[in-house]
Image (cartoon, grey):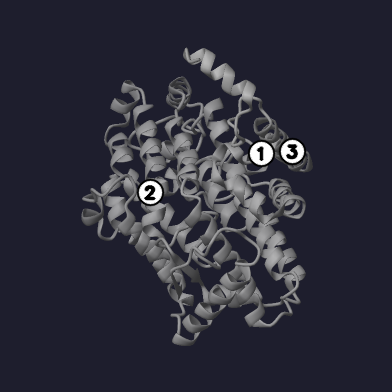
Amino acid sequence: MSDIPFGFGPSDRDPERREPGRGDQGGDPFGLGALFGGMAGGGSPEDVLGKMPLFAELQKLMNWSGGPVNWDLARQGAISQLAAGHQPTSEQERAAAAESLRLADLWLDQVTELPSGIERTTAWSRVEWVEQTQAAWAALIDPLAERVVAAMTSALPQEAAMSLGPIAGIMGRMGGLMFGAQVGQALGSLAGEVLTSTDVGLPLAPAGTGVLVPQNLASFAEGLDRPADEVRLFVALREAASQRLFAHVPWLRQQLQDAVHAYARGITIDREAIERGINEAMAGGMGGGLDPSDPESIQRLLGSGVLEPEETPEQQMALRRLETLLALVEGWVDAVVAAAAADRLPGHAALAETMRRRRASGGPAEQTFATLVGLQLRPRRLRDAATVWGAMGQQHGSAERDRLWSHPDLLPTSEDLDEPLDFVARQGLDDELAALTADDAEQAPDRPSDDPPTEDEDEDRRELGGEG
């Protein structure tokens, strides 16, 4: 996904994406350049927007009151993007998905202590994926969009707001439309790639629902030189494993969302940078000066980068936490799928390598979170997380491996992933220490005994009790 769907500018960690002229949005972190780009011919914003096909029903869209993202527009945009290649799912595809997910659960029963998390199975078309996952996306994106729009509008100095006149007001009123249009574009792109309901690292389907996307599975299988049913079963194993984790680790979903929302709470915009940028524009320092009647001058200001959010230390901590959690989820799925499929799927090694390359080149999870919060999921983190889970299973067994999910404090931290085998070794030392502590407690002298008291002990008790 080359665009920036959720309104954030390119991450500081990717300087190449900051080169001038690179990409359609360049230095326009909030995507407003596209919104005002059509005003170059003059006229009021309302006149220009009325001529844009996307805003043909402007009055209806401007009356949206369902939150900071216009989800009606997002849904319409995503579905229209998918219309040309849309293929509805057939009964045969739904039956094949159900059989693959059922078999996957049987195999996983033998390699993990976590029970099945699938209560029902289905196969979704790309359009159904958009429609069925919208509620989960809203819970994740709305707080981010709300904070960005609030920061964007409040950061404008009063004098600038007065100079900009109606344009400044529209910046606030168009927030829901801006995010709706860009989120729709993002979801449409994702819907053309995802293989399951958990492909982005979060469970997006209704609870207990295992999902495959047959049309995308067929595209994924092209060129793999493996039978289609084998590819489908491999992907079903990944979906079933993810469903187990999210169904039986109740805090996991909330922790992931909290990390994203913690980032959102820290979004601020440098008011001084805004003032400097506008003053420069007013003085003609941005290619001709700022003229409220000239939309091109507004676009130059929006594209100058002055509206880009600053990243605070607290936000960096939230990003590291999110990155680590996503890596641990993905690594655990890799480990248990390898244990379940290694001796059963002849092409498991090739399929696993294909999945690793897909992640390294930017799969749905990396694309989504990179554009959502500037997060780049490094393949090294995923490999280290998979090393932790694989070594835990080999050295301590699946029960001890899965026990680490019983509480957030037991999971490896980002620092632990720097030396994954050291973390696994420490788990063995902790087990030995716990066993020694238990043995010491059993041998403590004040432990009540079931043996009858000796004659001396009886005499002592009578004297202490005043008997005799």
Q: Is residue 105 left or right of residue 154?
A: right
In the displayed structure, 309 sits above or below 7; it is above
Mark 2, mark 1: which one is toward the viewer? 2
The local secondary structure at tag 3 comes to: helix
Residue tagged by mark 2?
139
Position of residue 261 measured from the top left corner of the image (x, y, whole percent)? 44, 38
Indicate the amino acid at tag 2.
Answer: Ala
Depth check, front residue: 58 or 21:
58
Q: Residue at x 66, y 61 (%)?
A: 336
Query: Which numbered disc covers residue 15?
Result: 1
* Disc on the earlier residue, 1 or 3: 1
Assign the N terminus to one quadrant of the image: bottom right
Query: Which numbered disc covers residue 209?
Result: none
The local secondary structure at tag 1 comes to: helix
Residue 428: image quadrant is top right
Residue 55: image quadrant is bottom left
Report how far apart the C-alphas of labels 1 and 3 lie in the structure. 48 Å
Pointer 3 local density, CA inside 10 Å: few below 14, some 14–19, many at least 20: few
Instruction: Count every numbered label the image shows and give the total.
Output: 3
Report how far apart the C-alphas of labels 2 and 1 lie in the structure. 30 Å
Q: Residue at x 47, y 37 (%)?
A: 300
* Disc on the earlier residue, 2 or 1: 1
In the displayed structure, 179 sits above or below 449; it is below
